[in-house]
Amino acid sequence: MNSVNLTKLSSAILVGLALTACGGGSSNNEQTSNIANTQSQSEKIECSNGLPKNLKTTGQGFFSDEIYSLETQPNDSGDENVIVLYSNKLTNGVIYQNLTTLLKNQPKQINIDFLESYLLTKSKLDTSFKQNNLTIGFPLGYLISQDDNSAIFNSFTDKCTIHIENQIKLNLKHIDISGMTIADLFKYYDYPNAGNVERYINSDLAQIIINNHKGSLEKLLANQTKFPSGSKLSYVEQSIFNTPTITFNDSDLTDYKSLEEFTDNTELPSGYIWHKDQFAGYKVVYPINPTTGISKSFIDNYTGVEMNGKIYQAYQVISGDLIKDQMAPLEDKLDMSETYFNKTAVQTLADALNQAL
């Protein structure tokens, strides 16, 4: 089974915060339009520490209800990743995430060590130093608009910058799992007996079950408990960026004195050459395909950024569908970064995991 795993890159650039809605599938890969993405020009966003006070999400969708995401994060000691269930709730235009108590032995708080503090696009530099765990939850970012099949998400910034260059269009796959069993949910990992079944759970999470909880996968594969009527799961099958986006934080500062020194000491991906460019007036360098002149959303930080006389090692996501860009031509099974469950389904899932792990 050919597949692609986006978890590392998603964590690096917070694509993993891409939330979902329930309904039918969607394959629209157009970039977001100005019409749906911005608050009325006459209505200025009031901002306090990165939290907009008067942002109104356009439309109704699954974000209108609390949804739950099955993911992984480091444990409290940081020495291994564990399985977690987050709740994700829309409040005043902001998606807040919280750890639930549905699973036993959950970490004490959401891990935010991976956060990138600088967001650099072609026209501007934004920061997100104020994105922290709050009493209400962790603010993932701003939901600009939604319907049953898609959503437009705007990255968190310290100044609540609502801008098309900060936005990602999420197209969503939704599956009615009413009457499906827990075993069906994990059947993809029943080697070598899986056959050509659908994947519902990402491989990093499955590996935690297999490697850290011996015998647990077998328990899940034997569990014939059925999900109740109305149970749904969702995952993001397209994450469409409007513009190339570079992200990094203070820990990405290098000892290099110039971008030339950065490229001299950074091994290029096979088949690529270095390309010098400018983003919002800042000098950058990144790999491109010499034939097409196009870069790629690499899972490693090959991009160099010169800012205030210092050199940072950064990630870049090119414009277009991140997930498609990450998939090789023959890959046909998406390895989603996380899976979302509605309230009807989540307790059945949690009970099964608590019994097995």
Image (cartoon, rainbow, N blue to C red):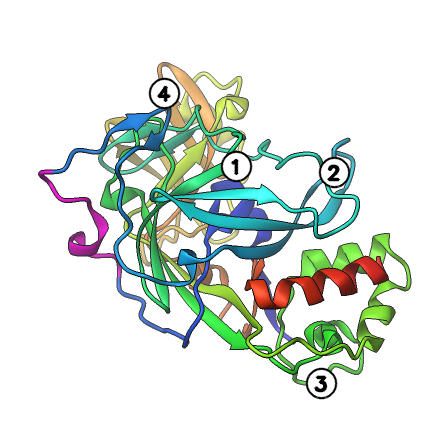
Say which residue label 1 marks: 137
User: Which label lies toward us, 1 or 4?
Assistant: 1
The image quadrant of residue 105 is top right
**Residues rendered magenta in the picture:** 31-42
| Rendered residue at 48%/32% (across/down) | 116
Tell whether position 224 is magenta.
Answer: no
The quadrant holding residue 46 is top left
Separation of residues labelled 1 and 3 (CA atoms): 40 Å
Q: Name the amino acid type tagged 1.
A: Gly
- Disc 2 target residue: 75
- Left or right, 187 with respect to 255, comes to right
> What is the crowding at mark 1: few (fewer than 14 residues within 10 Å), some, or many (at least 20)?
some
Disc number at residue 307?
A: 4
Q: Residues within 10 Å of mark 3 (few under 14, many from 20)?
A: few
Where 48 sits versus 338, above or below? above
Which mark sits nearer the N-terminus, 1 or 4?
1
Residue 25: x percent and y percent? 41, 75
| Kind of residue at badge 3 | Gly
Residue under label 3: 195
